[in-house]
Amino acid sequence: MSTTTPVPHTDPRGFLRALFDAAVAQAVPGVSTAAFLPRPPKGRTLVLGAGKAGGAMAAAVDGLWPADAPMSGLVVTRYDYVPPAYKARQQQGAGRIEVIEAAHPVPDEAGRRAAQRIVELTRGLTADDLVLFLISGGGSSLLSLPAEGISLDEKQAINKALLKSGAAIDEMNCVRKHLSAIKGGRLAAMCAPAKVVTLLISDVPGDSPQVIASGPTVPDTTTCADALRILARYGIEVPAAARAGLESGAFETPKPGDACFAGNEVHMIATPQQSLEAAAAVARAAGIAVHVLSDEMEGESREVGKVHAALARYIAKHGQPFTPPCVVLSGGETTVTVKTKGGRGGRATEFLLSAAITLQGEPKIYVLAGDTDGIDGVEDNAGAIVTPDTLARAAEAGVKPQDFLDRNDAYNFFRPLGDLLMTGPTFTNVNDFRAMLIL
């Protein structure tokens, strides 16, 4: 066992944190990115991109690209998500790729301006040029250029409604791309006839390139009609211009087989499954058996929390289907349907609060859940940790867990207990990470 890995039986919290850290480290772009880089072109190389890993991806590409090969570009990432070393290089005028910070998960004017500048940078590209497009989770809001006739305020309102609706990520991004002037393959069309090589860090179940950040450079198989059905399903109203564009088909996206995608390449450089495997390796090195349920878990966070907790209790009581001690891992992207105003917390904390209520203080079960980008929803925590005494400590503090779950306020349940998982910016994003330790 690694000397840096806490012993699970004596430090279960530290052990689970080590698994989370291993999952995140696996997804941070670095020297492994070199395997996916093409040769410098005859013409110029333009680097564009968006996402919470955008700053780290830009830093990796800049460091790996030949010093004598011309390169320039612009990438947009979340506020405070530029790695400090690369930010320092930029401030010194040494970085070849400009990195701009903008808002997530609701777009802002900085993101709109960055998207507009990216569009302008694509003008004049030739068949001798290369576009390296760096995309990761969060790009849908960071690369926000509303379709014609839709204002940024209107796009923000639609985005907020989608986030609160409980819609799955592929549903949200279907709507987003059809109400965008740049996503859903449109950026690839702007770059033609230059070759586009897209490097992806997946944050979505199934790792579909057309879903990750709403697929700016890849073909889109969804339609305006699909977007209208999703809006109707969740009762989301849109402005007249948006509805007209969808109903008329004016906002349709480029489809597979479109000439603008000819010769382009797409490479997945980090995925949720790879991060789960990295965490599993740490657990096995500590002598703990590991079982990975799936990297594609979806559904309401509180319901997924109940199912995970029920499984953990069954393992603890019956030694089936897995024998303790063991770790059960899962990934994916759950959702939270927000029913009340004023609550704080995201997918991970809501999952954990529901799991804690279901576990009812079951001995020897510890659960960690966190978003690998370091942000659970819009809060300052990545997630939290549930221990066998979580409910007992809550009772001593006069905290009633069901009340907090009812108002989507899991953050404020875990905060006074000191159980929030605080990591700060991780500079990557492969979505939810969940680990249950059954001793």
Image (cartoon, helix red, strand yellow):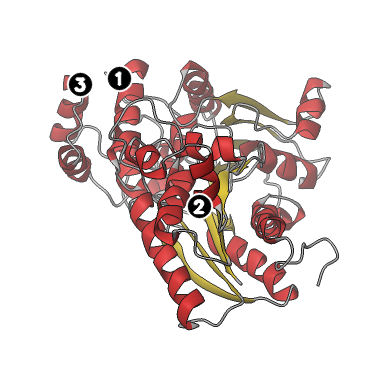
Q: Which residue is mark 3?
A: 239
Drawn side of residue 114 relative to residue 288, left or right = left
Per the image, label 3 sits on a secondary structure element best described as loop
State the residue position of label 1. 154
Q: Tell me, yes or no, whether the two marked residues, 2 and 3, touch with CB atoms within 8 Å.
A: no
From the image, which quarter does the N terminus lie in? bottom right
| Amino acid at dot 3 | Pro
Secondary-structure class at tag 2: loop
Residue 338 seen from this side: yes
In the displayed structure, 211 sits above or below 8; it is: above
Horizontal and vertical percent position of residue 437? 59, 66
Q: Position of residue 102 (x, y in %)?
A: 55, 24
The front one of 60 and 237 is 237
Tell me which numbered mark, 1 or 2, is placed earlier along the sequence.
1
Q: Alpha-carbon distance for marks 1 and 2?
A: 33 Å
CB under 8 Å between callouts 3 and 1?
A: yes
Tell me which residue sits at (65%, 28%) in the image: 80
Residue drawn at the location 56% of the way across and 54% of the way down: 389
Instruction: State the separation of the CA atoms marked 3 and 1.
Output: 7 Å
Q: Residue shown at 46%/38% (left/top)?
A: 399
Pointer 3 or 1: first along the chain = 1
Residue 84 in picture, x, y percent from top left: 77, 31
Label 2 – label 3 distance at C-alpha: 35 Å
Q: Quadrant of residue 157?
A: top left
Specify the amino acid type for callout 1: Glu
* Label 1: how many Cα within 10 Å (few below 14, some 14–19, many 20+): some
Residue visible at 46% across and 36% down?
Answer: 345
Q: Which residue is mark 2?
A: 264
Residue 416, placed above or below residue 265: above
Q: Is residue 371 among what the camera can see?
A: no
Q: Residue 307 shows which numbered tag?
A: none
